[in-house]
Image: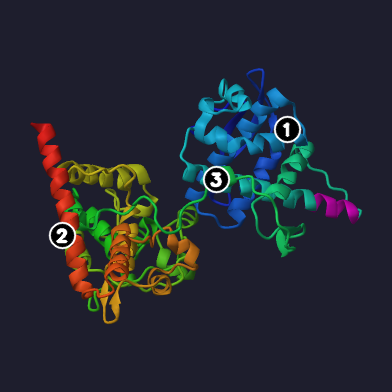
Amino acid sequence: MNAKLINFTSMKSVYRGKEILELYFVSGGAIARKFFFFDLFCQSLVDRNYSSNSIGDYLYRCVIFLDYIFEGFKVLGENAGSIKVLFLHYGDYLRFGSSSSSSLVKQICLHRPSPMISRNSALAYNSAVKALIDEAEVHVARIRQYSDSGIEFIEQIDDEFVVELSQLANLKVFGVKRKPVADFGLYGSSPKAKPSLTAHMGVKSALIIPPKFFPLEHINELIDCARCHRDAALWSLMAGVGSRESEADQIIFGDIDYGAGSVLLVNPSSRESTAYRGLSEREIKKLEWKGRDTPLTVFLEPYGERFFYHLEKYLSLEAKSYVGHKFVFQDENGRPLFLSDYSSAIYRPFLRAVKVVCDRHSLDGSGLAPHSLRHSYIYFMKNYVEHATGVGLDDFELMALTGHTSVEALRVYAVTDYQALLEKIYYANVSRRTRTPGSELELKIKFLEERLEDFRAQLNKRKSYDQ
């Protein structure tokens, strides 16, 4: 936990083999008592099989929220009305901090500074808070059900605050209000439209968003900048099949078919236990899976050829033999790469290569990460892959290809090429004006010629400035 807390202090703990946090209230600079409800929330994330990374993200974001709320209580007092007001201002706090127009947010920021994050990041923070509120709602319903059944329920929790927190469930986003069933924390459906508290944070565009993909024409160059064959093979695999990094670094030798030139991405929970010999139970629990519903992959060339080339070099020159496990990718000590520190073993080497490529071509590399290669794969398949009936795959074809389980989840990746969209509109406008349009190819050439003239004008203007 890197956040500097005002009203709490945190300690690391372990539950069912996954790292969680224990949260303690602070009063007068000293630890006052444990926040027992937060234990229940941590345990619920583990019980619902969240990945270790997701648990870490959720706990960090919820602690920021709780610290903000309790700092706000110092201004407004602690009651149900206060927590609703503070929740309404939370988006302003996250995004604008002391620059907010709200005097309440400004007062809180004097002692509890804002993380100053983007709108989309604020939405991610809100998702974690929503999970915390859902858990409070389930817990309160459980206590009431026990009480109605005559069962005495004794537990050290902050009952009043948890009840106030649970009431925020009545103020969540539009949609189906789900009624909690206390015994198992399950949900039945009871449709009720609810006003949105997060509308002021904005909504992500599902069609045209700032590009997160690595520039398609420079991926080969990126692979060439890898400092070892292992990284080159890993990046080639991610670019070639559009995999997540966690899916790529968890493949075992049995997933590779050298003859067919293919690789399977297999859900760890579906494997036989013998596949993970050499790993402790705690290490096995660190395996991640984001929900891909097919093990099949299709390589985009030339990355498939590059993967098998660098894989052969890596296994013969870099990988250690007789390591006692079946994972393809290893760290420097021969242990499975997925167990290593992500930042130092995977993220930083990628950023070094990104910087070389972007500096060479005067590109903006901010925001690029290994996951950008997955964006590149899906972006290419959506807009440019040529096939017998045209160019580009539709959303349902992409779902089958990438293992996404819904169109909504896919749309974060499968964005429309804005220039291609402009070309289509250009064709339509010419057709409406002339009534006798030329062929599609003639229109496209005319459009590109006009764009070329614009680029030349911009280039000449830049040269005149340089002189």
Badge 3 density bin: few <14, some 14–19, many ≥20, Cα 10 Å = many
Task: Tell me the distance, in whole angstroms, between the alpha carbons under discs 2 and 1.
Answer: 61 Å
What quarter of the picture does the C terminus occupy?
top left
Q: Is residue 257 above or below residue 426?
A: below
Residue 410, position as x, y percentages in the image: 44, 63
Task: Tell me the distance, in whole angstroms, between the alpha carbons under discs 1 and 3.
Answer: 23 Å
| Residue identified by numbered label 1 | 82
Task: Tell me what residue is drawn at x 23 percent, y 59 percent.
Answer: 233
Badge 2 density bin: few <14, some 14–19, many ≥20, Cα 10 Å = few
Tell me, for residue 58, which label it has, or none. 3
Q: Is residue 154 above or below residue 72?
A: below
**Viewer-closest of 151 and 6:** 6
Label 3: element kind: helix
* Left or right of residue 121: residue 233: left
Q: Nearer the viewer, mark 1 or mark 3?
A: 1
Range drawn in magenta: 142-149
Q: Do the residues under discs 1 and 3 have CB atoms within 8 angstroms?
A: no
- Give, as a three-letter code, the residue at label 1: Ser
Residue 342, position as x, y percentages in the image: 37, 46
Whichever of callouts 1 and 3 sits on the residue coming sooner in the sequence is 3
Q: Nearer the viewer, mark 3 or mark 2?
A: 2
Residue 21, position as x, y percentages in the image: 58, 40
* Left or right of residue 102: residue 233: left
- Give, as a three-letter code, the residue at label 3: Tyr
Label 2: element kind: helix
Say if the magenta span includes residue 304. Answer: no
Q: Quadrant of residue 380?
A: bottom left
Tell me, for residue 449, which label it has, or none. 2
Q: Residue furthest front?
A: 434
